[in-house]
Protein backbone atom coordinates (compact mmCIF):
# COMPACT_ATOMS: atom_id res chain seq x y z
CA UNK A 1 0.00 0.00 0.00
CA UNK A 2 1.44 3.33 -1.05
CA UNK A 3 1.32 6.49 1.02
CA UNK A 4 -1.34 7.87 -1.32
CA UNK A 5 -3.47 4.75 -0.86
CA UNK A 6 -3.08 4.93 2.92
CA UNK A 7 -4.02 8.61 2.93
CA UNK A 8 -7.07 7.96 0.76
CA UNK A 9 -8.21 5.09 2.94
CA UNK A 10 -7.61 7.10 6.12
CA UNK A 11 -9.52 10.05 4.69
CA UNK A 12 -12.39 7.80 3.62
CA UNK A 13 -12.49 6.24 7.08
CA UNK A 14 -12.55 9.66 8.75
CA UNK A 15 -15.37 10.79 6.45
CA UNK A 16 -17.30 7.65 7.37
CA UNK A 17 -16.72 8.22 11.09
CA UNK A 18 -17.87 11.84 10.76
CA UNK A 19 -21.03 10.76 8.93
CA UNK A 20 -21.81 8.10 11.54
CA UNK A 21 -21.28 10.60 14.36
CA UNK A 22 -23.71 12.99 12.70
CA UNK A 23 -26.22 10.15 12.26
CA UNK A 24 -25.97 9.28 15.96
CA UNK A 25 -26.48 12.91 16.91
CA UNK A 26 -29.58 13.11 14.71
CA UNK A 27 -30.90 9.83 16.11
CA UNK A 28 -30.47 11.05 19.68
CA UNK A 29 -32.13 14.37 18.88
CA UNK A 30 -35.12 12.60 17.37
CA UNK A 31 -35.60 10.18 20.27
CA UNK A 32 -34.61 12.38 23.23
CA UNK A 33 -37.89 14.29 23.76
CA UNK A 34 -39.94 11.08 23.67
CA UNK A 35 -37.50 9.22 25.93
CA UNK A 36 -37.36 12.06 28.44
CA UNK A 37 -41.14 12.34 28.55
CA UNK A 38 -41.53 8.58 29.00
CA UNK A 39 -38.83 8.47 31.70
CA UNK A 40 -40.37 11.40 33.55
CA UNK A 41 -43.90 9.96 33.57
CA UNK A 42 -43.44 6.18 33.85
CA UNK A 43 -43.06 6.22 37.64
CA UNK A 44 -45.72 8.88 38.23
CA UNK A 45 -48.47 7.09 40.14
CA UNK A 46 -50.96 9.77 39.08
CA UNK A 47 -50.49 8.85 35.43
CA UNK A 48 -53.42 6.79 34.09
CA UNK A 49 -52.18 3.54 32.53
CA UNK A 50 -53.87 4.26 29.20
CA UNK A 51 -52.06 7.59 28.90
CA UNK A 52 -48.74 5.99 29.89
CA UNK A 53 -49.27 3.37 27.18
CA UNK A 54 -49.81 6.17 24.64
CA UNK A 55 -46.62 7.92 25.78
CA UNK A 56 -44.72 4.63 25.61
CA UNK A 57 -46.10 4.03 22.12
CA UNK A 58 -44.85 7.44 20.99
CA UNK A 59 -41.42 6.64 22.41
CA UNK A 60 -41.30 3.25 20.68
CA UNK A 61 -42.42 4.73 17.35
CA UNK A 62 -39.83 7.51 17.54
CA UNK A 63 -37.12 4.97 18.44
CA UNK A 64 -38.04 2.71 15.53
CA UNK A 65 -38.12 5.62 13.08
CA UNK A 66 -34.79 6.93 14.37
CA UNK A 67 -33.23 3.46 14.14
CA UNK A 68 -34.45 3.06 10.57
CA UNK A 69 -33.02 6.44 9.57
CA UNK A 70 -29.76 5.63 11.38
CA UNK A 71 -29.50 2.29 9.55
CA UNK A 72 -29.93 4.11 6.25
CA UNK A 73 -27.19 6.58 7.16
CA UNK A 74 -24.85 3.73 8.15
CA UNK A 75 -25.45 2.09 4.78
CA UNK A 76 -24.83 5.38 2.97
CA UNK A 77 -21.63 5.95 4.95
CA UNK A 78 -20.32 2.48 4.16
CA UNK A 79 -21.18 2.95 0.50
CA UNK A 80 -19.36 6.29 0.45
CA UNK A 81 -16.33 4.67 2.10
CA UNK A 82 -16.31 1.96 -0.56
CA UNK A 83 -16.70 4.52 -3.33
CA UNK A 84 -13.84 6.66 -2.02
CA UNK A 85 -11.49 3.72 -1.54
CA UNK A 86 -12.47 2.05 -4.82
CA UNK A 87 -11.98 5.27 -6.81
CA UNK A 88 -8.37 5.28 -5.61
CA UNK A 89 -7.98 1.64 -6.71
CA UNK A 90 -9.51 2.38 -10.13
CA UNK A 91 -7.29 5.40 -10.69
CA UNK A 92 -4.16 3.27 -10.25
CA UNK A 93 -4.90 1.14 -13.32
Image (tube, rainbow, N blue to C red):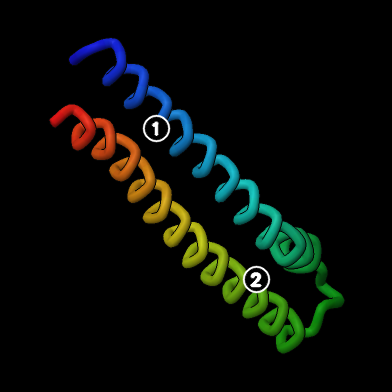
Instruction: Point out which mark residue 12 bears.
Output: 1
Q: Sequence-wise, which precedes: disc 2 or disc 1?
A: 1
Position in image of residue 92 (x %, y %): 18, 27
Q: In which quarter of the image is residue 1?
A: top left
Instruction: Inspect this view and state whether residue 43 appears.
Output: no
Quarter occupied by residue 58: bottom right
Are circles 2 and 1 on residues that touch, CB within 8 Å?
no
Cα separation between marks 2 and 1: 35 Å
| Residue at (44, 61) in percent of width and height | 72
Across and down, in percent, residue 70 comes to 50, 58
Report the residue at 82% width, 68% height from top.
44
Q: How crowded is mark 1: few (under 14 residues within 10 Å), some or many (20 or more)?
A: many
**Mark 1 secondary-structure assignment:** helix
| Front residue of this view, candidates 86 and 51 | 86
* Numbered badge on residue 59: 2
Q: In this view, does 71 lie above or below 7?
A: below
> Given the current orientation, which residue lies at the most extreme right position?
46
Determine whether, in the image, residue 54 is placed left or right of residue 85.
right
Q: In this view, does 34 lie above or below 52?
A: above
Element type at mark 2: helix
**Residue at left offset 46%, top offset 29%:** 14
Count how many numbered circles sit on residues in the image: 2
Eye-nearest disc, 2 or 1: 1
Name the residue nearer the viewer: 84 or 48: 84
Which quadrant would residue 66 be assigned to in this image?
bottom right
Nearest the viewer among 55 and 68 is: 68
Q: Position of residue 73 (x, y in %)?
A: 47, 55
Amino acid sequence: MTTSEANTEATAFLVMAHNLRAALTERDALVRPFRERYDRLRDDLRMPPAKLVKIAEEFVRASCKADHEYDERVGESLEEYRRLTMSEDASRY
